[in-house]
Image (cartoon, rainbow, N blue to C red):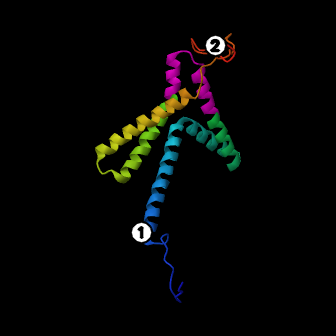
Amino acid sequence: MVVVEGATLATFVTGTITMLIIGVLLNIVGLGIFCRALFALATHALPFFVGMSVGIYSFQAGAGPFGAIVVGFVAAGFTSVIGQYAFSVARSPIVRLVIGLLFAVPAAHAGYSVTLALGHLGIPSEWWRESFAVLGAIAVGGIAWANVSMQTGPALGPGTALRPVQPPNGATTAGG
């Protein structure tokens, strides 16, 4: 091995092209994380709005910054849990529709706004921006509806007790 005085060691990792590629890939990952966070927040628009409103009110009432944040988180969680419980307890399809729409409509509006704002960054045509915004509203509203309806099991009716799960017809259990 020959060591030359004053020579710099060039590696593959410090090359200009490699750094450009790593930079582009990290930007794509960062944009993906940012979009995921925006759309996760949009699907929880109603609990977020309630939490923010209660948090701001409690701050103005003198709870302080930490107390307002805690109260806001508790109110948002309470809104989400109560909405899911009310959806699971409701027997009437009309009541379930209203509860689902209470969560889905603000989420769809937030999804529309976020998608339109992101569309202004890279889509020159107004028609395409609006088309993507409507698709974003449908997707986020549908996800919010699914969050309310899918995470809750059917509630037990009055006088109904929990029973062991019955195997399907024709299936045998381990005991015989």
Residue located 33% across and 45% down the image: 129
- Measuring from the top left, give residue 82's x and y in whole percent: 62, 28
Q: Tell me the SS state at disc 1.
A: helix
Residue designated by label 1: 17
In this rendering, is residue 7 above or below 164? below
- Measuring from the top left, give residue 167's x and y in whole percent: 61, 15
**Amino acid of disc 1:** Ile
- Measuring from the top left, give residue 19's x and y in whole percent: 46, 67
Corner quadrant of residue 91: top right
Residue designated by label 2: 157
Q: CA distance from mark 2 to mark 1?
A: 65 Å
Q: Nearer the viewer, residue 155 or 176?
A: 176
Left or right: residue 18 versus residue 65 is left
Q: Tell me the SS state at disc 2.
A: loop
Quarter of the figure with the C terminus:
top right
In this rendering, is residue 67 above or below 16? above
Quarter of the figure with the N terminus:
bottom right
Q: Nearer the viewer, residue 46 or 172?
A: 172
Q: Is residue 57 magenta?
A: no
Left or right: residue 138 versus residue 37 is left
Left or right: residue 171 versus residue 94 is right
Crowding around mark 1 (Cα neighbors within 10 Å: few <14, some 14 to 19, many 20+) is few
Q: Earlier in the sequence, mark 2 or mark 1?
A: 1
Residue segment shown in magenta = 78-101
Numbered circle sitting on residue 146: none
**Amino acid of disc 2:** Gly
